[in-house]
Amino acid sequence: RVWIRRAQEQLALLSLQDRHRWDDAEEMIKTLASYEQENQRYLAESLAAKAVLRAYQGKHQESRNILRSQLDSSLDEFLPVRSPFRKLINEAQKLNRKALD
């Protein structure tokens, strides 16, 4: 089961890289969130992915809300510093700042 979860994490990351696959990314994000009972890390990953997807879609306020209210508390505890999902958070923050300029 662990390998299936890892594969789904990778699919979510790959789907975010192609705007034509954002619908697939949305589904993978929901799938990751559904594993929250197993490990809170999956919820943190899904929130990070959702925040960057919303930023990509130009929904910057929604992205900021996810980053501030939902993800803030679980970030340090559940997402390692080198996690690719941390990079997504940084990307979302960068896009959201750029939208304010």
Image (tube, grey):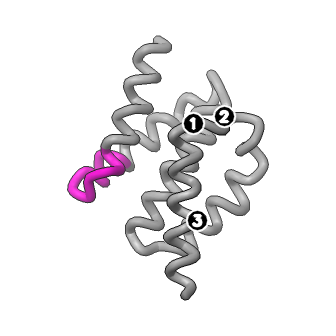
Mark carried by residue 2 = none
What residue do we see at 39% from left, 41% from top?
Answer: 13
Q: Type of residue at label 1?
A: Ser
Whether the magenta-drawn stretch holds residue 21 is answered as yes
Residue to which mark 3 is pinned: 93
Q: How many marks?
A: 3
Return the x and y of residue 65 as percentages of the image width and height. 64, 67
Determine whether 95 is above or below 88 in the image: below
Query: Secondary structure of the magenta portion, mostly?
Result: helix
Cα distance in 3D space between marks 3 and 2: 18 Å
Residue to which mark 2 is pinned: 80
- Decide which of tag 3 and tag 1 comes sooner along the chain: 1
58 left or right, relative to 76: left
Q: Type of residue at label 3?
A: Gln
- Does the CB distance between marks 2 and 1 fall below 8 Å? yes
Q: Type of residue at label 2?
A: Pro
5 left or right, relative to 78: left
Residue to which mark 1 is pinned: 83
Q: Is mark 2 on a helix, strand or loop?
A: loop
The image quadrant that residue 58 belongs to is bottom left
Return the x and y of residue 9 as percentages of the image width and height. 44, 32
Q: How crowded is mark 1: few (under 14 residues within 10 Å), some or many (20 or more)?
A: few
